[in-house]
Image (cartoon, grey):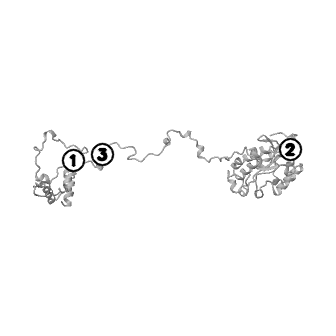
Amino acid sequence: MTTPQQQSAYLQAMGIQAWVPRHVASAESHVEEVAPAVVEPTPDAPAPAPTQMPSLAEMVANKAPALASSPTASPTPNPTPSSTRSPASAPARSQSQLSSPTPATPVKTAASLVESADEKTPPPFFNDEPPMLTDDFMPEQELSDIDMSSFTDAAPVAPVINVSTLDWPELQTTASACTACELHQSRTQVVFGTGNQFADWMVIGAAPDADEDQQGTAFVGDSGKLLSNMLRALGLEREQVYISSTLKCRPEGDRNPPPEAFDLCEAYLRRQIELVSPKVILAVGDAAAQQLLKLKTPLSEQRGQIHQYQGTPLVVMYHPSDLLSKPGEKAKSWEDLRLAASVVSGNAKAKSA
């Protein structure tokens, strides 16, 4: 059988109307009418050769009735009851009927299934654009119940290490390795503190400057010399007091440190104060006074009073560097020093803040 004949037989079996040339149709009918001859073997004759495999047209022709009667095919109108039909009563098909295919029940294809689906109610968003997302995408939680603070800039986390039980060597080692804030990136070394660790006086400055960062000691240079002279006027040597700072690292370019820097560094200072246990704290300079007292008022309004920090009396005074540029303020600083001395001696008469 030629290729056109095979294609024609396949289309006919599938119930697809197609134009078939007359010579192809006659060849197909001839193939269907002529039955293979049965060879009767004789005792002396050799066994017949194996039966040849059926052609594609024969396979399709044999398959066509099964396709027509399959559950997916639509029932033929007015079918004859199977109980009244028999092979003997079935009329023989003529040559013309063999050449012209009988219209078969159409088999449902993918295209027909899509068309039938279109006639039904389409699913949501099948033909339209999907809706915009609304607030109900979190049905189990209202937006008002969400903690929006988690979407804002989070506050810096305090150092993980608990320094409240560390002794002096452990505290200094921990502070030297601290990276809790960005200031550790600009420091040369940590300015931890120097002096008598059992002093009655504790002098606290603000962030280290460039010279203090290089030497690792607070109050150096001309301002340090002036502070030493002022203490000496009270009968104190520098080695008799403990000197530290609110921040242990120098800000880059001596700029103002970020607000969270002191919050992270204050734990070290508190532990230093606990270990020293001074009778008075002398906060030197406007920045140190504001950080310790948590006040935004200028130093001129804070001086002349006895404040409290963690239960320890605190007195503020001008920074020695300010006194170098404003010598007229030295008299006020002398008054503040005498006020602190009266606290140590127990003879404080000034009004507490």
Q: Are marks 2 and 3 in contact (CB under 8 Å)?
A: no
Callout 1 amino acid: Ala
Residue carrying label 3: 116
Q: Amino acid at mark 2?
A: Leu
Element marked by disc 1: helix
Residue 231: percent from the left, percent from the top? 86, 50
Which x, y percent locates residue 111? 30, 50
Is 240 in front, or is 106?
Answer: 240
Relative to 3, 224 lies left or right: right
Distance Cα–Cα, label 3 vs label 1: 24 Å
- Dot 3 amino acid type: Ser
The residue lying at 89 percent from left, 50 percent from top is: 233
First along the sequence among labels 3 and 1: 1
Q: Which quadrant is home to the C terminus?
A: top right
Position in image of residue 130 (x %, y %): 43, 46
> Can residue 261 be seen from the camera position used here?
yes
The reply to whether the C-beta atoms of the residues labelled 3 and 1 are less than 8 Å apart is no
Residue 241: give x, y in percent of width and height. Answer: 83, 49
Name the mark on residue 339.
2
| Quadrant of the image containing the N terminus | bottom left
Q: Which residue is mark 1?
A: 66
Q: CA distance from mark 2 to mark 3?
A: 99 Å
- The tag on residue 351 is none
